[in-house]
Structure formats: C-alpha cells, structure tokens
Amino acid sequence: MIESLLSAQLLFAAAVLGALYALIGLGLNLVYGTMRLLNIAHGDILMVGAFAAFWWFTLTSLSPLIALPLIAVFGAAIGLALYFALFRHQLAQELDASVIEGRSLLLFFGVSVVTQNVTALLFTATPRAYRHLDEVYRFGDLAMTGNRIAALVCAVTLLIAMLIFLKKTLFGIEIRALIQHREAARIVGVNVEKVQMVAISIGFAVTAIAGTLLSMTEQTNPFMGFRFTIAAFVVIIIGGLGNIRGGIIAGFLLAVMEIYAVTIFSAEARSILIYGGFVLAIILRPQGLLGVRKRA
Amino acid sequence: MRDTFTLITVILAGVGLLYFGSIGAGPYWQIVALNLAMWIALTQSWSLFSGLTGYISLGHAVAYGLGAYMMATLFSEWPIWVLVPMGGLVAGVFALIVALPVLRVRGPYFVILSFGLSELVKYVLLVVETALGQSSRLLFGAPGTQTLLVWMLALAAVATLLRHVIGLSRFGQGLVAIREDETAAETIGIPITRYKVLAFALSTVIPGMVGAVMALRSTYFEVLQVFSPTISFTIVTIAIIGGAGDARGPVLGAVFLIALSETLRGVSPQLYLVFLGLSLIFFVRFVPNGLTGLLRGGGR
C-alpha cells in the first residue's frame, strides 16, 4: 500500500494536474489582484478553452498544441470584451474595493450561467473527448501518455515564461505594482487602465490555454468549469494574493492532495476535499480571502 | 400598524386570487401558481436574512434540499403535516450549527463561502446516499397539486408577512444597522452575532418547508437535483431583479421570473437559464442601486 502510494505514477498525475491548477490560479490571481474582480466564471473560461480545442481538433485534425496561440487570443478577447462591457466603467469610478468585489461576483455569476448554457445550447451537454497523442511511454514502472507529457511540458513552460514576464519586464512589474498598491502604482505613473486590460487579457488567455491542455487528458462538458473555479480560489487563498510563486506551490499542493484523496478513498472524495478545503480556507481567514496584503 | 393591515389584506387577496383563479383556469395554471408561490416563499425568507443584513447567501439550496430529503426519507412513515414543519426545523437547526463560523466571514467572501458550503453538503450527502445504496428515492401516493398549492400559498403568505413584520421590528432595524456598518452597530450595543445567527437560522426554516412540499410535487428525490446551485442562484436573481428592500421586491421578482420561465422553459431550459443570467447581469450593471445597498455594509 505504502509503496503504491509513493509510486511515480501518482506523482506524475499530481504534477500534470498541479501544473494546470497553478496556471488557472495564476490567471485568477492576475484578474483578482489587479482589479478586485471576483471571477466566479473563471472555470468556465477554462471550459471554453477546452471546447475550442475539441472543435479545433475535430474540424482540422491538427494538434490542439498548434492552436494554443489562437486559443490564447480567443481567451484574451473574451476577457477584454467583458472588461469593456461590464467592468471598465465601474473600475474607473474608484469605488470601494468591497463594492467592486460584490458587484463583480454577481456579474461573473451571471456570466458563468450564460457561458455554460450557451455552450450547452450550441454543443449539447454531452461530454466530449478526443484521442490525440495517446501513445504510452514507459520509464521503469512509470507509464505516461503522450498527451499528459505534452500538457505538463506546455504548462510548466508557460508558468516559467509568466514568472519571467512578471519579474523582468516593465509590464510585469507594473502588474505586480498594481496588485500590491493601486494608489501608489498610479502615483508613480503606472497607466492603471492599460495594465488592467493587459492583466485581464493574460489572465483569461492563460486560463483558456489550461483548458486546452486539460481537454487533451479529460472529458469536456459545458458544466465542468465550476470545479476549477473553486480549485483556483483554493490555490490563491493558500498561496496568497499577488504571490505568484506561492500560488504555483499551492497549485501543486492541492493536486497532490486531490490525487491521493481520489486514490485512497473514491472519486467523490475529490469534490468533498476541494469544497471542504475551500470552506476551511475561507473560514480560517476571516480577515478576507487573501488577507496577506490589503489595499490601503 | 396600518401598513401591516394593508399588507395582510393584499396577501389575502393575492392568495385568494392565485388559489381560485388557478383552480378555475386548470391544471397548468395550478402548477404556475405553485411555482410562483414557491419562489415568493423562498425569496422572502432569503431576504429576511440577506436583504436585511447584506450577507448575500448563495447557499439556501441547502435548506430546500434538507427539507426535501426529510420528506423523501420519512414519507412512508409519518404524515405530511408533521414532515413539512420538520423539514423547516432540520434546515433551521443545520443553519444554527454552521452559523457561528460561517457568519464571521463578511462581504463577498461570505457569498462564495455560502456557495462552497452548499456544494460541500451536496457532495457529502451524495456519498452518504451512494453508501446507502440510494441513488434516488420515489414517493408513492403523494397528494395532488391542489393540496400542495394550499401548503405553498400558506408558506408564501407567512414568509411575506414575516419579512414585513421583522423588517419593521427592533430586531430588523438591528439587522439593517449591521448591513450599513457592522462595527458601528456593535459599538452602539446591537448584539450583532446573536442577531445574525438568529436571522440566518430563521431565514432557512421556510425554505426547508418549501423543499419538503416540493419533494411531494416531484415525487422523486435525487441529491444533485434538490441541492442544485440553480435554486440559490434563482433566489438571488429574483431578489436583485425585484429588489430586496421590502416585501414587495421578491413578489415582483418572482412574477418576472415565472413569466420568463413559462415563456422559455418550454422552448429550452438552457435558453431560459441564459436569459436568467442575462437578466442578472443587466440588473446588476444598469440597475445597481438595490445591490449597492445590499453589499455596502457587508464588505467592510
């Protein structure tokens, strides 16, 4: 039993899931951190990315990996459209953060319901999957399918690229400045409006890419998103607001717990673990979801 | 006082109209009246807590679900008039148990917490039912729509009256003070924790009873269906569309919802949900005042 629990197989599964959690956590971190938008539709963006990949593969027979830039642009376009339609006006009013959070939560809730049901109307609620890169590679005891390896490599590459972007480029530093202190960032000359647009574009793009990668390993259906929304929230609660590296660690941590819970108990344990972790995380941090740094 | 008498008259007139009107108009309209009364009862109760305190709950499906669960498990053993109040009692007791830790969390965090908790309860019960070998339960020999309509109209009437009376009471004013500024409310001596817990528990009792009655309506119980987040979501949408400021809001919102659902549900349930989501977005974005009032105090 112990041996099987330490198996490379489980750790590999956890690494793939963890990399995806880290990505969607990163996406949520950017959107929540810079604008205080509580994006409860985050997982639905992932679902849209997964569906885009499914149709790309079905219609063109080309690898979804080729379509990643396209799907990223698609995700970013959705983010920008929502930004202009729903949030730009409110953010410009410089309302209290709690008002922004409350309204954005309800707006995104509406967005979530609309996205799920429009997808179900267009493509029916039938779960969909496709076979791509499903040949098995063996290293000793470890058996890995090509699509999981590809998902892991792509996700980790993107994570590293994002870390470098946020640390080294001026735009990245401006985003982090906005996350840390909105007013101070404005005072030192950060173009808040522009940074917000970039942040929501990148946040949505990264999440859509995570959806594409996920679709290569799991079934896709219009109502799959909520689980990932909650996972993303757990990740940024544990990792800390604006703490990109913390979020990445938290993503892997959550994935390890989840994979082991499913293996030891049952598939239902997954939902109980995620929602239980979510409930506990919020209750134990009553000062606010992320309580690490507050906007002054 | 005169206000209350006017309201009672209006409620009685409304109940009479819905009852005799729908009985006269036929079975379809009885179901429409039943659904309308159900959403009014649910949203008035929700508003008793969320409207007054500004703590927006996305978890009231749990109360509904527990009531339905109660009815589904004990239907063959006990009479309905015991089980319906018991559904409310169980929901209220559950709310009391979770209230203390949950109500420490404020503002938008409370909203997502209530949602997460609701999903947690759903999946725990799913595991329990699976372990019991019960993927679904059937209720044989449930009473007809007319009887259920009487129950539901009574629940809607009581919920509306309760919302109105508590809104005017000292207790209700205390809850509003919590919404406006929780810290200030505490400073002037309002027992905020006791008030919040009491309002929270009270607001789940009628939804528990509604759930019990609705289990009789569907004669079929399945965890995923009765603990559905769509129920919580619909309640909030009704309240936001109608406004949760007083007892009129939920009624207006429920009428809007029923009109929407009766027009679209026949076409496609998904289309109906799309329009429901769009209505929510529209009202939050362009008619935001009710919402601002709701969330202002809770978010500090």
Image (cartoon, rainbow, N blue to C red):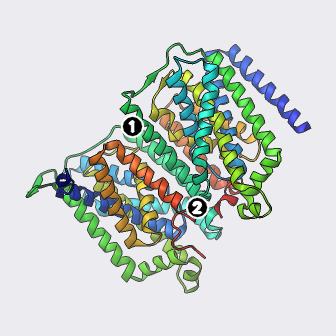
Q: Amino acid at mark 2?
A: Glu
Is residue A44 in view? no
Q: Residue at x 25, y 46 (%)?
A: A58
Label number found at residue B95? none
Q: Which residue is mark 1?
A: B127
- Left or right: B2 as drawn, with respect to B245: right
Looking at the image, can residue B156 be seen? yes
Q: Do tags 2 and 1 sit on the same chain?
A: no
What chain does mark 1 sit on?
Answer: B
**Extreme residue in the bottom direction:** A188
- For discs 2 and 1, the disc positioned in front in the rendered view: 1
Please identify the quarter of the rendering in which residue B211 is found: top right
Q: Is residue B133 above or below residue A250?
A: above
Left or right position of A192 against B241: left
Report the residue at 35% width, 64% height from top: A22
Q: Give the SS element for disc 2.
A: helix
Q: Position of residue B65 (x, y in %)?
A: 53, 34
